[in-house]
Image (spheres, helix red, strand yellow):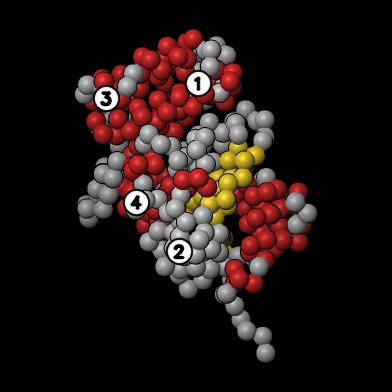
Amino acid sequence: MAIDRPVPQLVFVHGIGGPRDPEATLAEWKQALAEGAQGAGLAPEAEALIEGRSADCSFAYYGDLFASEGAQGADSPEAADEEQAAIMLALMTEFLDELLELPEHRQNVRLRRLRRQLGPLDDAQGVGHVGRLLATGLASVGAIPGLHLGARALSRGAFLRILSQPGRYLRRGYPDAAGLTLDRRIRDRILARLDPSRPAIVVAHSLGTVVALEALSEYPGPVPLFVTLGSPITTHAVVWPLLRPRPPATPATVAAWADFRDSDDLVVPKRRLAEAVVPNARGVGPVSDRMESALLWPHDATVYLRRREVAATVLRTLAEPASRA
């Protein structure tokens, strides 16, 4: 007699960005993953995914929380509070430091001048000063000749979101009427999508990798696979030292962690997750896969999901008996 096994969950977690339609985004991400699976020779698995036969798919959306009352303060650099502004400035300076380590930018005089203008973080005197430094950086990056095309392609608003949303999350502030901070409410959105009685594959992108890592650290259910795409987790000046719990480690219930990073993704630090994160009691740590795309802006989630390596990892795990246990 056949034993019915629970259908696994496939939970997508988004990163930075403006408001979006969760259902439309879920369909877009599933389609991108299916296209990647077809490219990897997994057409039947791709069809099963789209038809909902291989997994119950859901999209953990928290973007609206950044625009809610109590989470304001980053529509402009000058509007951020002191702690958030300091986090944003640290992210900006680390971004520039990463660019200056690239061979094509080591002799970029204007980029080095901008980095010197931002100065050591300890020199910042007051939130107004920090806000002005951020405004200078945002206005100057795209105008530097010879700068990485991906950086120049970013609008001021897009760059501000890249800096401000991690800053607001890591600020651990902005409590609601019930006293729940913004980061707590965001993690609760992720956990609300997870059913501990069924195995869950969690695919997170960008800032979502930070959120998902922290959420899974308190999650009791089985996670056969945790996938991180374009992750800023090891951003050493800000994200890494502010992660909880410490030291940053693979969540206890994660059985495998696949990390994908594009070599041209400006959001991803050079320090690999595999070299930084402490393995869990099972000995599981992140396995990083560096990819080459030669795209102007390879950070988009759907760009990663269409990669054969990503799609094959996810769909083959869905097909394994262990993922249905």
Across and down, in percent, residue 93 comes to: 40, 25
Mark 2 packing: few (<14 Cα in 10 Å), some, or many (20+)? few
Specify the amino acid type for callout 4.
Arg
The reply, left or right, for residue 294 in relation to residue 166 is right
Residue, disc 4: 246
Report, in whole angstroms, how far the alpha carbon at label 3 lies from the one at label 4. Answer: 24 Å
Image quadrant holding the C terminus, namely: bottom right
C-alpha gap between disc 2 and disc 3: 38 Å
Q: CA distance from mark 4 to mark 2?
A: 15 Å
Q: Residue at x 53, y 31 (%)?
A: 266
Is residue 233 among the parts visible in the rendering?
A: yes
Q: Residues within 10 Å of mark 3 (few under 14, many from 20)?
A: few
Helix, strand or loop at disc 2?
loop
Question: Which residue carries the number 2 mark?
Answer: 281
**Mark 1 and mark 4: Cα distance apart in space:** 30 Å
Across and down, in percent, residue 239 comes to: 39, 40
Residue 122, numbered label: 3
Q: Amino acid at mark 3?
A: Asp
N-term-proximal mark, 1 vs 4? 1
Task: Indicate the amino acid at tag 1.
Answer: Leu
Q: Which label sits on residue 171? A: none
Comes first in the chain, label 2 or label 3: 3
- Contact (Cβ within 8 Å) of mark 3 with mark 4: no
Task: Tell me where residue 311 appears, x and y as whole percent.
Answer: 66, 52
